[in-house]
Amino acid sequence: MHVHSVTVCQDRVDVVVRIDDDERMRTAGDDEAVRRVFDLLPGLKRHVCDNVEGLTFAEEITDTEVPHLFEHVVIELMARSGSPRGLKGETQWDFSRDGHGVFRVSFEYDDDLVCLGAIKTADSVMAHILDGTAPPDIDLETARLRGLRSRMPQVAGALTRG
Ligand SMILES: [Zn+2]
């Protein structure tokens, strides 16, 4: 899974991701990946999800699109960095329009820098989950993102003081 582009809009951040390998497009059958997800981010077990089947995310994760998992990983990282748990993500795709394997994932955000940092960290979380590379230090990364958040008011204060 590659993050192809990230666009910060007024009310959301849009991410385009691409998956080249058809066999890696869903989590189905990859029990090891599911185990790694919950080991690294146990908070994902509590996520709810809008889907027609009425499944919880813990049920849905056993067979879902990899970019949809990425969406929930980003939302969880943002929450652990102090963003409201109610922020929503959305995963859409239209292969006939955008090309095969191209997904559009959008995020609501309360702080754009925290959202962008969470997307970057989620990229290495996904590499760990899918390929078994070394996991990022979640506590360290989310502490860093919290630091970005607290710096913002100081910058604004300095500007208004002229
Ligand atoms: Zn979902």
Image (cartoon, rainbow, N blue to C red):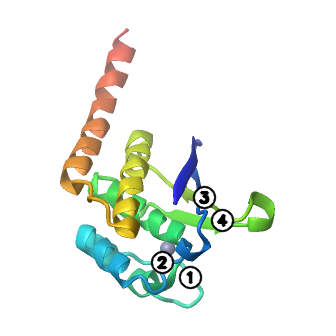
From this view, report whether residue 61 is shown above or below residue 110: below
Identified at 71% across, 65% down, the residue is 100
Q: Earlier in the sequence, mark 4 or mark 1?
A: 1
Q: For residue 136, what is the image quadrant?
A: bottom left
Q: Using the image, determine if residue 72 lies above or below residue 47.
A: above
Dots 3 and 1: beta carbons under 8 Å?
Answer: no
Q: Upstream in the sequence, badge 4 or badge 2?
A: 2
Q: Reading the chain from its start, which is encountered first: label 3 or label 4?
A: 3
Left of 52 or right of it: where is 117? left
| Label 4 crowd bin: few (<14), some (14–19), many (20+), radius 10 Å | some
Identify residue for label 1: 51
Instruction: Please state which of the two labelled residues, at mark 3 or mark 1, is closer to the viewer.
Output: 3
How packed mark 1 is, by other alpha carbons closer than 10 Å (few <14, some 14-19, many 20 or more), is few
* Sequence-wise first label, 2 or 3: 3
**Cα distance, mark 4 to mark 2?**
22 Å
Tag 2 residue = 49
Q: Is mark 2 within 8 Å of ligand 1?
A: yes
First in sequence: mark 3 vs mark 1: 3
- Kindly identify the residue that appears in the image at 64 percent across and 66 percent down: 92
Density class for disc 3 (Cα within 10 Å; few <14, some 14-19, many ≥20) is some
Which mark identifies residue 18? 3
Q: Are marks 3 and 4 in contact (CB under 8 Å)?
A: yes
Pointer 4 residue: 101
